[in-house]
């Protein structure tokens, strides 16, 4: 809103609409978390609209690993978002998407050994447990996802699921569902309420 006011765009902010918004209350805060990004402020011209800062100032954190799409793996960043949202809002927090996309292929016989997915979720769930220990009211966790589905760009190559779906972008094959190693791991985690990770 400050940016809109500084650019003389605040005439679209109608006082009665802002008053109506001010009366609303959320029951909880939800968010999706996959990776963190860092910004190099020297790359961002003064007066840049907030929604362009990330694209203009993006810089990789040299201390983090990334998947092949460049998404940096940062469970400590997940902890930071949980704590920040809770401390700023005082509302219960619900991460509704959290996962890692990886290119995977099934040989038709053997279980997919996706230890990288187990490590990703184990580290992020530990960060969640640490946030709860430190006072955040976290009411749930949704790992993304149960089965491999096309990504938001319609690409089947980037797989998030703990169950492999036997298809590609252009060949539906037999669409067989095949549990990966992470499926059995998640089952134990859920059954033990996070005690077995």
Image (tube, rainbow, N blue to C red):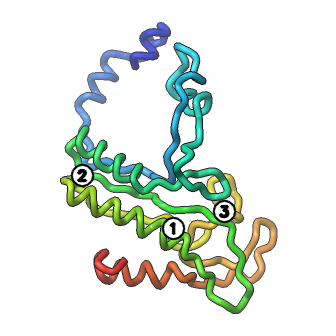
Q: Residue at x 59, y 35 (%)?
A: 58
Q: Tell me the element at label 1.
A: loop
Quarter of the figure that contains the C terminus = bottom left
* Closest to the observer, 170 or 116: 116
Question: From mark 3 to mark 2, how far is it between C-alphas?
Answer: 31 Å
Q: Quadrant of residue 147?
A: bottom right
Tell me the number on the disc at residue 33.
none
Q: Is residue 50 above or below residue 95?
A: above
**Which callout, 1 or 3, points at the residue further toward the start of the chain?**
1
Q: Residue at x 24, y 52 (%)?
A: 92
Q: Quadrant of residue 164?
A: bottom right
* Outermost right residue: 170
* Outermost bottom residue: 109
Q: Residue at x 56, y 84 (%)?
A: 179
Residue 192 position within the rendered picture, expressed as x and y whole percent measured from the top left: 30, 82
Label 3: how many residues lie within 10 Å, few (<14), some (14-19) or many (20+)?
A: many
Label 2: how many residues lie within 10 Å, few (<14), some (14-19) or many (20+)?
A: some
Question: From mark 1 to mark 3, how far is it between C-alphas?
Answer: 12 Å
Look at mark 3 in the image and give the residue it sits on: 158
Question: From mark 2 to mark 1, how far is it between C-alphas?
Answer: 22 Å
* Closest to the observer, 58 or 106: 58
Q: Residue at x 25, y 38 (%)?
A: 88
Foreground mark, 3 or 2, reads: 3
Look at mark 1 in the image and give the residue it sits on: 145
Asked if disc 3 and disc 2 are in contact, CB closer than 8 Å, the reply is no
Quarter of the figure that contains the N terminus = top left
**Which callout, 2 or 1, points at the residue further toward the start of the chain?**
2
Look at mark 2 in the image and give the residue it sits on: 92
**Which callout, 3 or 2, points at the residue further toward the start of the chain?**
2
């Amino acid at each position: 809103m400050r940016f809109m006011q500084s650019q003389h765009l605040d005439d679209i902010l109608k006082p009665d609409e802002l008053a109506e918004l001010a009366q609303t209350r959320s029951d909880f805060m939800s968010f999706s978390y996959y990776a963190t990004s860092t910004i190099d402020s020297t790359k961002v011209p003064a007066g840049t609209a907030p929604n362009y800062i990330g694209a203009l100032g993006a810089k990789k954190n040299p201390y983090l690993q990334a998947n092949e799409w460049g998404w940096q793996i940062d469970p400590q960043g997940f902890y930071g978002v949980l704590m920040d949202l809770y401390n700023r809002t005082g509302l219960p927090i619900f991460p509704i998407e959290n996962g890692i996309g990886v290119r995977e292929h099934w040989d038709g016989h053997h279980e997919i050994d996706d230890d990288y997915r187990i490590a990703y979720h184990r580290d992020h769930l530990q960060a969640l447990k640490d946030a709860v220990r430190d006072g955040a009211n976290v009411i749930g966790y949704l790992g993304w996802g149960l089965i491999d589905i096309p990504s938001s760009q319609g690409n089947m190559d980037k797989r998030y699921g703990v169950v492999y779906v036997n298809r590609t972008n252009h060949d539906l094959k037999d669409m067989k569902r095949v549990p990966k190693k992470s499926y059995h791991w998640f089952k134990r985690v859920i059954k033990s309420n996070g005690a077995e990770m």
